[in-house]
Image (tube, grey):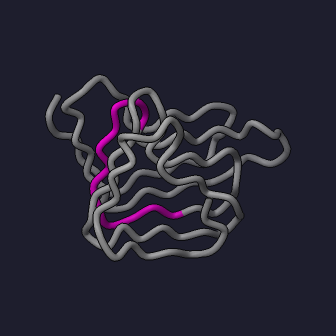
Amino acid sequence: MITSSTTLIGNLDCSATSDAAIYIGHDGVTLNLNGFWVKGANGYDVIDNDGYNGTLIKNGTLKPVGEAIGFDNEYGGNSATLDVVNIEGDYSYYSFGVDSENSSGLTVLDGSISGM
């Protein structure tokens, strides 16, 4: 779980786990993939944000086998916001881009999907 802004320093392969690769655990977190990729586990989110506000995910590739980004305001309250900038998705397997439930503040800028 990341609770403060973070920049990757290499590729992250979490395909052997049985959970999300990265959990966002606080408001105002920026996750800079820094040109690298993150691969998720079968049936799980690559990045999971359960309602934290002001999240920015940018500059890299997500390789999901479930959902690329789970953005669910599970805990109610104010609508959380998520910005996705310059993110590519490698959807070579069964997967979704962004699954947004109970949230209204989603912005995707400069994203692409490949491998479908």
User: Percent x, y for residue 69?
Assistant: 47, 43
User: Percent x, y for residue 60?
Assistant: 29, 62
Q: Nearer the viewer, residue 82 or 74?
A: 74
Q: Residue at x 69, y 33 (%)?
A: 102
* In the image, farthest residue toward the right: 77
Query: Is residue 10 highlighted in magenta?
Result: no
9 sits left or right of 83 in the view = left
User: Percent x, y for residue 101?
Assistant: 62, 31
- In the picture, which quadrant includes the N terminus? bottom right
Q: Is residue 89 above or below residue 100?
A: below
32 sits left or right of 49 in the view = left
Query: Is residue 66 highlighted in magenta?
Result: yes
* In the image, farthest residue toward the left: 115
* In the image, farthest residue toward the top: 94
| Quarter occupied by residue 72 | top right
> Magenta span: helix, strand or loop, mainly?
strand
Q: Is residue 15 above or below residue 82?
A: above
Q: Residue at x 27, y 55 (%)?
A: 61
User: Percent x, y for residue 47?
Assistant: 49, 48
Q: Residue at x 34, y 38 (%)?
A: 64
Which span of residues is magenta-colored?
Answer: 56-67
